[in-house]
Image (cartoon, rainbow, N blue to C red):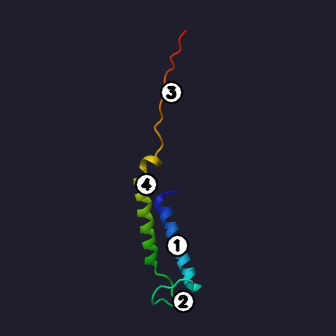
């Protein structure tokens, strides 16, 4: 799955979870009524956070994530 799609889907479901939390009065932002939806700008914030985090981890662990280069087997020294 491409990184932008993964970040978008993750941010969408986090935004949806925030709205469910608001509807059940589990989580309310300051000045937010129970009937108010969480702003779509919040989904953009989640997207940016996830995208930057994924990209940073990929850069830090680039060598560990990359496949090891294939090496030809060493020639055996068989004597007759």
Q: Earlier in the sequence, mark 4 or mark 1?
A: 1
Residue plotted at (59% across, 85% down): 24
Crowd around label 4: few <14 · some 14–19 · many ≥20 (10 Å): some
**Name of the residue lying farthest toward the top:** 80
The residue pinned by badge 4 equals 58
The CA distance from mark 4 to mark 3 is 30 Å
The CA distance from mark 4 to mark 2 is 39 Å
Is residue 48 or residue 77 the one in the foreground?
A: 77
Q: Earlier in the sequence, mark 2 or mark 1?
A: 1
The CA distance from mark 3 to mark 1 is 49 Å
The residue pinned by badge 3 equals 73
Crowd around label 2: few <14 · some 14–19 · many ≥20 (10 Å): some
Q: Are marks 2 and 1 in contact (CB under 8 Å)?
A: no
Q: Are marks 4 and 2 in contact (CB under 8 Å)?
A: no
Q: Is residue 46 left or right of residue 35?
A: left
The residue pinned by badge 1 equals 14
């Amino acid at each position: 799955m491409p990184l932008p799609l993964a970040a978008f889907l993750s941010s969408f479901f986090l935004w949806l979870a925030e709205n469910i939390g608001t509807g059940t009065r589990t989580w309310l932002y300051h000045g937010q009524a129970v009937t108010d939806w969480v702003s779509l700008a919040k989904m953009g914030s989640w997207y940016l956070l996830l995208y930057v985090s994924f990209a940073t981890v990929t850069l830090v662990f680039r060598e560990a994530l990359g496949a090891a280069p294939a090496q030809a087997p060493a020639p055996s020294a068989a004597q007759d």
